[in-house]
Amino acid sequence: MGITSAYLKNVYATVERRDAGESEFLQAVYEVLESLEPVVAKHPEYERYGILERLVEPERFVQFSVPWVDDSGKVQVNRGYRVQFNSAIGPYKGGLRFHPSVCISVIKFLGFEQTFKNSLTGLPMGGAKGGADFNPKGKSDGEVMRFCQSFMTELQRHIGSWTDVPAGDIGVGAREIGFLYGQYKRVRNEATGVLTGKHLTSGGSLVRKEATGYGLLYFTSEMLKSMKNEGIKGKTVVVSGSGNVAIYAIEKATQLGAKVITASDSGGYIVDKNGVNLEVLKQLKEVERGRISEYAKRVPGAEYHEGWKGVWTEKCDVALPCATQNEIDGESAAALVGNGVMAVAEGSNMSTTPEGVEKFQKSGVLFGPAKASNAGGVATSGLEMTQNSQRLSWTFEEVDAKLGQIMVNIFHNSYKAAEEYGMKGNLVAGANIAGFLKVAMAMLWQGTV
Ligand code: NDP
């Protein structure tokens, strides 16, 4: 397709000049601008009010040093970030990622996408993201705690329950959220819902841990049913990753009667033709923080393969990438298509490269983009914020039912937006348009603040 309108070309050229070298951010911006061609053609007021120029420029970006003491007594220094991208429809909201690959480009692409995703949930949340180039892998609990405390000592000045509410992401799970929350409470003398993904004893919500993976399956089931008149039951599913999103995607897919045959980490992947054994996987990853290669040693009949990319050569009906950005490139997409994949839905953010997305769309494979298909995590974070404001806790069934309904709505709103703007079946465009329209309307209404 490509960007053809003079206005959007100009917006993109400015981003390219200002943010040169930020490849992930440029990729995310290009995809959104490309989808919005028919929208800006219909709404010339967006150009007059500079809506797109404002959307691609974060409202605030903070970078800070995070000094901490390792177990040998040596001082280490990492780099921390928070990008507060857009607050038109509510307080900034988005996760924190601790991984050595974290840099300005990664944080900005995630924060930019979060604005549209949060809008799609129908809840009042603006877009943000943050993190650090810290690797929790191999660190002791004490080291992780000291790092989190130092990180929060700075971050607390920029966040608050009505300002900006962070959550987890890669490398930030229940343990890290606990240390971050404890430090915020101590420094600010406030027990408030400033983070989501909290422990149930400290204002957390039931279903938050499961939400992104479960939501991914609710979305995928609705996509299969509405667009192919098919169910997930009986399908063979390939999942990548073995972290929070992957584990609960595997759990819900299995509960719905599908057979998940893979899981992976950055070292390699396992194939278990009998269906992944969740008890073993959870023990290995959630309790022992071990490597996926161990799974094959514990489960008879399971095989381990070195290298994570090979997971996409396994034959399946449905593929659910749940590890990291750009994990499915054109070559992997071609392998999946060659093996007859019917649907792909992104659990990880921007899992697929533009070449991969094009391959799926041209081959008639149903494709659910992350902004829509993995929005269940942040949606349930939104429900956690509501419960914190009410000082109440809802039951598992109540939260799960709300999550299910939100995911069904996201699918239909994305589908309808694509159809209305002449791109029927293109959920990438539909999710971008549906997410954008609400944010743009709020920005117009609020003036150039
Ligand atoms: P976790 O840290 O729990 O798990 C991440 C998994 O992905 C691990 O198996 C990890 O393997 C693997 N992985 C990470 N980086 C790479 C890499 N560069 N190459 C190959 N494998 C890699 O993270 P989450 O499950 O929380 O997040 C996974 C994805 O889902 C991310 O894209 C995140 O942004 C997205 N997401 C998460 C949400 C949430 O609620 N947690 C909400 C919405 C989206 P290893 O251990 O070897 O690093």
Image: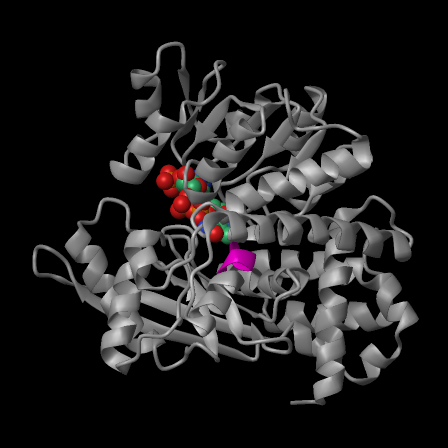
Task: Locate residue 129, reporting x and y percent.
Answer: 49, 65
Vertical placement of residue 31 versus 320, above or below: below
Q: How many marks?
A: 0
Left or right of 75, for residue 300: right
Viewer can see residue 398: yes
Q: Quadrant of residue 42?
A: bottom right
Vertical placement of residue 231 versus 301, above or below: below
Left or right of 440, for residue 17: left
Task: Locate residue 393, reporting x and y percent.
Answer: 42, 61
Question: Chief secondary structure of the magenta span?
Answer: helix
Q: Which residue occupies the foreground of this view, 144 or 230?
A: 230
Residue 191 lies in the magenta-colored region: no
Magenta residues span 377-381
Q: Which residue occupies the foreground of this view, 254 or 73?
A: 254
Task: Locate residue 139, reporting x and y percent.
Answer: 21, 49
Rendering quadrant holding ligand 1: top left
Task: Locate residue 238, reporting x and y percent.
Answer: 56, 27
Q: Quadrant of residue 14?
A: bottom right
Q: Which residue occupies the foreground of this view, 85 or 30?
A: 85
Which residue appears at 18% of the width and 56% of the height? 143
Which residue appears at 47% of the width and 39% of the height? 248
Viewer can see residue 326: no
Which residue appears at 71% of the width and 26% of the height? 337
Which residue appears at 39% of the width and 67% of the height? 195
